[in-house]
Amino acid sequence: MFTATMAALLAAMILALGRLYLGPTLYDRVLSANSFGTKTVLLIGVMGFLTGRPDFLDISLLYALINFIGTIAVLKFFRYRTLGDRVGPSGDRQ
Amino acid sequence: MSIEAIINIALFVFLGLTAFAILKLRALFAVVMLSAVFSLVSAALLVHLDAVDVAFTEAAVGAGISTVLMLATLALTSRHEKAPTRSQALPLIVVFLTGFALVYGTLDMPRFGDPQAPIQVHVAPKYIADTQSEIGIPNIVTAVLASYRGFDTLGEVTVIFTAGIGVLLLLAAFIREPEGLRVQTMDHHLVLRVVTKVLIGPILLFALYVQFHADYGPGGGFQAGIIFASAFIIYALVFGLENARKAVPGRAVRLLVACGVLLYGGVGFVSFLFGKNYLNYSVLGADQVAGQHLGILLVEFGVGLTVAAVMVSTFYAFSGQNPPIGDEDW
Amino acid sequence: MGVSDILGLFNYWMVIILMMIGFYTVVSRGNLVKKIVGLNIFQTSVFLLYISMGKISGGTAPILTGKPEVYSNPLPHVLILTAIVVGVATTALGLALVVRIKNAYDTIEEDEIQAADDETEFGDPQAAEDHRR
Amino acid sequence: MSALITDAVSWALLAAGSLLVVVGALGLIRMPDFYTRMHAAGITDTLGADLILLGLMVQAGFSLVTVKLLLIAAFLFFTSPTSTHAIANAALTAGLKPRVAESPGAGKGSAAPEGGEP
């Protein structure tokens, strides 16, 4: 059963990779990169059960915690054109 | 073919496809996203190849820091690669010739997974056999990293220290001061602010767990340092760089960069004073195993301090730059 | 050469393919950020080469469980673990250089930087072209 | 007997989760524009991921592994919808128009300043 789950995850990953390559907009790319991250979390988890040493879930946990940073950085990059503080009147883009 | 071989092949094919896509695409933003995916796949592959500690490091680096640095660079330079103007024939020939020479070289290599390969019979069996009695911790990688090959690691930490200083020297002169202008942060993103506040605590806690649990599971100063830095970076991204600088001033971070290396070197110096070799921790405790425990703990803490401080000050240096691109050029 | 040989060398061949893709990106593309990404691919391929060599069939991760087990070689793991963090620190240094080059030349394309250099050295682009011949 | 039930429950959860993950990925590649793809990637994926993690938890029983899986599920449950929300917000404020029935050809991102790049 783990094998079937693994196969499903690998298939889903290749589809997400296809969307990442095709685009067409930047947002599609961020979305597919994000969903690829979720699938990697699951893949590493299932892989641990498959090999019989499931105590290495720390790596999945790490991804679940900090994959978020990349998305926030991308969002900030889109909206404010910088990762620092936007200064001055032209920065306001509500 | 076993399921393990199939996973191995599938993940390597993913890596190849991603790398090829990176080569083909000229939109640099897509390249950054693809390199994040490249890092995810290689971390999964490293777990599959039993290198959990390495996968942990790759995950910590690839999930946040490298994407953030690349995006900061794109924000300061340009988002599109120009079409190549020169002929591509010569590089292609060189690459193919080198590739064939290397493939020819692999034909004599021991096959993948061979327990009798030269690499498996030389030093590694000693480390695996002696770690329990000499160092007394289950994670052999941490034992080799911090104790058996502690000198190497000191060198690596010094390299990270030097690279951090290089970044500061290159960029610090161009850091902009706001001078009373209104600073805009992500005030209107209520959802993001709340979720970030919820997450920062667990991230810091997890970093502490990784830092001090390294004896028993995958982890250590290198990974923990990056996770710590990630927590500060996420704070700076959402609540503004100025607020982050108020919480953790740039001066203090720059001081910590040096403190970590100093702590590592200092532990080695203490063993000098007791008349032992440099970085021989046995003198630090009542018996050898206790000394090794304390030494590894201190040394890993020094590593974590330096890595975290270098990453945070690098982020400050990059994101404090004046963006040269006007709003209309995009 | 049988199937077991091909499977036994597959990892090394994929590593070489990745390495060559990275190498090609570095030598054929003019954009400095792209070059750094290419260098990162090359670097990861080297990491995978080391880790592949350390793997033992049927082995498990080198964290002692108390039971008699075959452990994969921990030494490459130690070397590569530190190399990854050093790699990100040096990447940051490279990116800082790119930012400074952008400030100084207003471009991050290699041939435009070369042209700007030629112009300051020789006065006009044509003379530089002649000089190089 | 109880082992059989545990296995059956965990397999059912894993199968359902795998199905959802594959369907989500298919939607990501087949849907016509960004906002519809977002549903596939955001909603389906979150449920699929949590189902798979639940299946693994049933398999692991009461141990540290289950606690870690629970934490992963909790954090994914927080971050995944937030990321989707953030991306959608960014796309909308940048002017990417959703594709609607009356205007064929819209939603290709032609209205967005960042849209339609190669």
Image (tube, rainbow, N blue to C red):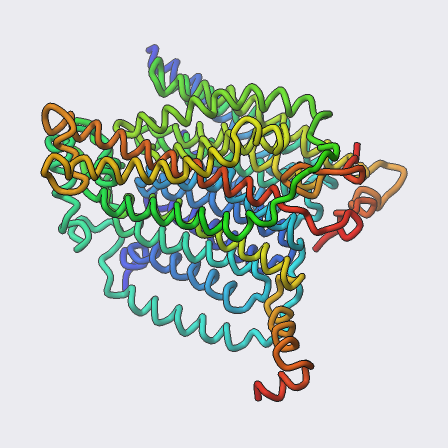
Specify the farthest residue to the right: D102
Give the position of the N terminus of chain D as an image quadrant.
Answer: top left
Question: Does residue A56 show up?
Answer: yes
Residue drawn at (16%, 29%) of the image = B284
Question: Where residue A60 sits in the image (x, y, percent)?
Answer: 43, 30
Q: Quadrant of residue A6?
A: top left
Specify the farthest residue to the top: D2
Give the position of the C terminus of chain D as an image quadrant.
Answer: bottom right
Question: Where residue B273 sits in the image (x, y, percent)?
Answer: 14, 36
Residue drawn at (55%, 55%) of the image = B22
Residue C64 in the figure: left or right of residue B94: left
In depth, the one of D10 and B289 nearer the eye is: B289
Question: Where residue D50 sits in the image (x, y, percent)?
Answer: 52, 22
Residue drawn at (36%, 51%) of the image = C48
Question: Does residue B60 show up?
Answer: no
Q: Quadrant of residue D80?
A: top right
Residue D36 in the figure: left or right of residue B104: right
Residue B276 in the figure: left or right of residue B269: left
| Location of residue C27 with respect to B50 vertically, above or below | below
| Location of residue B103 with respect to A42 vertically, above or below | below
In depth, the one of B271 and D112 nearer the eye is: B271
Residue A87 in the figure: left or right of residue B22: right
Question: Where residue D77 sits in the image (x, y, percent)?
Answer: 56, 22
Total marks shown come to 0
